[in-house]
Amino acid sequence: MEPDQLRAEVERVLADLTDLGGRLGVDVRETVAALRARADDLSSPVRLPDAPPVLGVDACPGGWVGALLTGGRCQVLAGSSLARLVELARESAAVQVVGVDIPIGLPDAGRRQADVLVRRELPGKGSSVFTTLTRAAYEATTYAEARAANLEATAGTEVMSAAAQSYALRERILDADGYVRSGPPVAVVEVHPELSFARLAGEPVLAGKRTPEGQQARVAALRAAGFPVPWLAAGPGYAVDDLLDACAAAWSAARVAVGTAECFPPVPEVFSDGLPAAIRA
């Protein structure tokens, strides 16, 4: 339901409640005022929180592209490794949280609940959430070896082959995994841009992120939240859709920084790597 429609429906219900209270001789003014305030909250866009400097990061063909959100501005950065990108960002601002669109916390066997739950949150866009393979699969140096390793690791739970799309992220996943396990000077959390955009827009953005319609919808959602969308242009190793995903990641990182982000699952899973596996938005 659109915000204006929601407000009109709420006002109709509140008018009925006020009328009923009058006929029953019950003072419902405080109740109506509280419900109207709640309606204002529900019909307002999800605003950009007033957060400390944060960095949103998306994997791209050239490595990583980042959206540094600080002081009401968004600066675009790029780096060949996640460590280098965070280092560049910290040269400009005291980054508190880094939101990365890449799996953090690799399972030993079976599926991650983070992937399962977020896929359910994205009707019509569930295919954008790739199933994270096991650590053994990502440590394999060829796709054939990864498939065999994943089948062996998941035997006895739910036998899972290794999707080529999931394995294609191997280099970026291992880069992020190594960085997070090294004990970085900032908090690094996993995000998913399609979930971020769904929260920003109030529903999943079904138009493809590489299409003009999809990019316009994503820009509109960011701007409605007060996000300072940077100049949108392809750069060294990244495309416009990569940059938009980094902006969405920064929005979620800001919510993490101020403690208002959702977490899927609410209590992160922890596998043998000791990393909390959860997607935040």
Image (cartoon, rainbow, N blue to C red):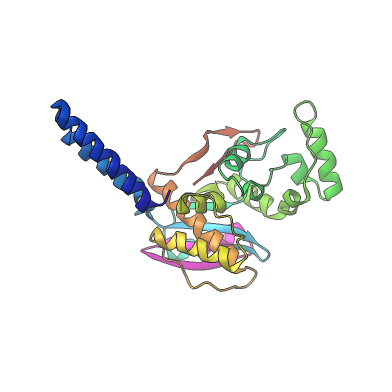
In the drawing, does residue 224 fall left or right of residue 105?
A: left
- 126 lies above or below 274: below
- 129 lies above or below 208: above
User: Where does the image place residue 142, in percent across and percent down from the top left?
Assistant: 84, 50
Residue range in magenta is 65-88
User: Where does the image place residue 171, in percent across and percent down from the top left?
Assistant: 71, 54
**Residue at horizontal 66 percent and vertical 33 percent from the top:** 272
**Residue at horizontal 82 percent and vertical 33 percent from the top:** 152
* Image quadrant in which you'd find residue 61: bottom right
- Does the segment drawn in magenta span residue 265? no
Q: Is residue 86 visible?
A: no
User: Where does the image place residue 10, in percent across and percent down from the top left?
Assistant: 31, 43
In the drawing, does residue 99 fall left or right of residue 94?
A: right
User: Where does the image place residue 146, in percent across and percent down from the top left?
Assistant: 81, 44
User: 275 or 183: which is nearer to us?
Assistant: 275
**Residue at horizontal 64 percent and vertical 47 percent from the top:** 129
**Residue at horizontal 47 percent and vertical 69 percent from the top:** 230
Q: Single out the residue that lies furthest toward the front.
A: 23
Q: Is residue 188 visible?
A: yes
In the drawing, does residue 92 fall left or right of residue 117?
A: left
In this figure, what is the number of numbered marks?
Answer: 0
User: 210 or 8: which is nearer to us?
Assistant: 8
